[in-house]
Image (spheres, rainbow, N blue to C red):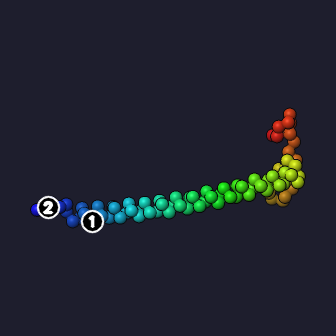
Amino acid sequence: MSTKIEEKELEQLVAQQSVKAGLISDIGAVEARKHELLHAFAEVATKSKELNETLEEKYGKITVNLEDGSYEEIVEEDGQAD
């Protein structure tokens, strides 16, 4: 003869396991989305670097005002940029 826990206790254990399984699934989905976002960020960072290099070739070292597109040259002191 086997000994059993009460039905209510078993229901609680099963419910908790179900919640844990759901949370693990959600964590996996979040991690997958995080990976996608990090990849997208890396792509944007690469494109941004390429554009900055193109602009530097065309205009020299500048700081661009993102509101109106105006720019100022970066003045170097002692051979180093500020």
Disc 1 target residue? 11
Q: Residue at x 81, y 52 (%)?
A: 53
Examine the rendered structure and indicate whether residue 29 appears above or below residue 80: below
Q: Sort mark 2 into few (<14), some (14-19) or many (20+) by Cα contacts within 10 Å.
A: few
Type of residue at label 2?
Answer: Ser
Q: Is residue 52 visible?
A: yes
First in sequence: mark 2 or mark 1? 2
Q: Is residue 72 visible?
A: no
Type of residue at label 1?
Answer: Glu
- Which circle marks residue 2 in the picture? 2
Q: Residue at x 79, y 56 (%)?
A: 51
Percent x, y of residue 22: 41, 64
Q: Quadrant of residue 39?
A: bottom right
Say left or right for 35 vs 24.
right
Say left or right for 71 vs 34.
right
Q: Residue at x 81, y 40 (%)?
A: 82
* Nearer mark to the viewer, of 2 and 1: 2
Percent x, y of residue 33: 55, 62
Say left or right for 41 vs 25.
right
Q: Residue at x 83, y 50 (%)?
A: 63
